[in-house]
Amino acid sequence: MNLQQLENILMIKEEKSITRAAEKLFVTQSALNQQLQKLETELGTPLFIRSRSDWQLTEAGKVYVQAAKEILNIRKDAYNRIHDIADLSRRHFTIGLIPERGVNMFTAIYPVFHRTFPEVTLEPFECNVRTMQKLITRGTIDLGLITLTESQKDENTYLHMTDEEILLAVPSGHPLAPGGAHRPEEAPDIDLAAFSGDPFILISQTSTMYDLVEDLFERAGFRPNVLFSTSSNVSKYRMVCAGVGCALLPAVFAVPDSRAVFFRLREHPKWEVTMCCRKDAYLSSAEQAFLDLCRSYWKNPNITEGEFFL
């Protein structure tokens, strides 16, 4: 049993296809298949139930995969601990970033982190929350910026950064706009049901915000007239400013604009901004320092980069 073999089996399990796994691993399918068959012969039992497009683990395969995850995680944690003890300056860890807000946080934090840890290499990955959760569980990503509700958390560890309110943004020409505010912090409360006849730009189903939004419409007692869906909150807000329709937005995207008006929903719905890591993972001193910078950033995510470093 070697580390590459463990990683290869985990990739087959993740992709549920030896063809797709071979592509991700940059090896030939025949070479990967031969390695798997050799391992199964050694173990005396198959690890996968083969099918054309959906490979599933056998009971023996589940045991092997669980052990593989534990072995690889133990190795990673041991190396991090040893590096801290030896005070080695050359280190590497990976950061998962959700689109739009993740890049904003990273660009604000990284310059000061780099000055403190100039020899530490950070490798950012941009992906959606559900993909990031899987990659963190697998150990592919060490830390990840995640926005979600409590019910969407898995077995990973979630380090609270802030709670973020969901606001309603409407075009300034809307009949109810005079009762709203151009500045989100001044937005008055309103019932979502008052907008039951309006067109909406919704977040796509791939977003963890989708379940929260669906629940808000259900409690308001109507199904929205959806013009289109998008994974981008920035695009949603631009459509509001263009007068196309209304949108529910996380507060960080509610930037004052004369073309848009904001309301707070009476329920004051919120979701959580967290940094996520693998359960029981050992975090190096560099990773702990990065988390401290994240906490400082989320106290006021709308400040400029220059202000952040004061």
Image (tube, rainbow, N blue to C red):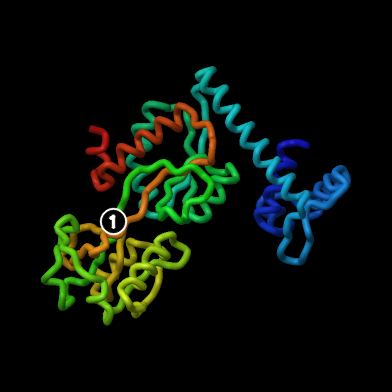
Q: Dot 1: within a 10 Å radius of its alpha carbon, few (fewer than 14), some, or many (20 or more) residues?
A: some
Q: Vertical placement of 265 versus 18: above or below?
A: below
How far across and how far down the image is residue 256, in percent? Answer: 19, 59
Q: Residue furthest left?
A: 178
Determine whether, in the image, residue 142 is placed left or right of residue 41. left
Q: Looking at the image, which residue is at 32% across and 46% down? A: 162
Q: Looking at the image, which residue is at 30% across and 69% down? A: 247
The N terminus, quarter of image:
top right
How far across and how far down the image is residue 71, in percent? Answer: 67, 36
The front one of 164 and 177 is 164
Determine whether, in the image, residue 248 is placed left or right of residue 178. right
Q: Vertical placement of 291 versus 250: above or below?
A: above
Residue 23 sits in which quadrant? bottom right
The front one of 11 and 163 is 163
How far across and how far down the image is residue 213, in percent? Answer: 36, 66
How far across and how far down the image is residue 133, in percent? Answer: 52, 50
Determine whether, in the image, residue 35 is placed left or right of residue 196. right
Q: Residue furthest bottom?
A: 197
The number of numbered discs placed on residues in the rendered structure image is 1
Q: Label 1, secondary structure: give it.
A: strand
Q: Looking at the image, which residue is at 71% across and 63% down? A: 54
Q: Residue furthest top?
A: 86
Q: Looking at the image, which residue is at 53% across and 40% down? A: 279
Q: Vertical placement of 275 versus 288: above or below?
A: below
* Residue where numbered disc 1 is placed: 165
The C terminus, quarter of image:
top left
Q: Amino acid at mark 1?
A: Glu
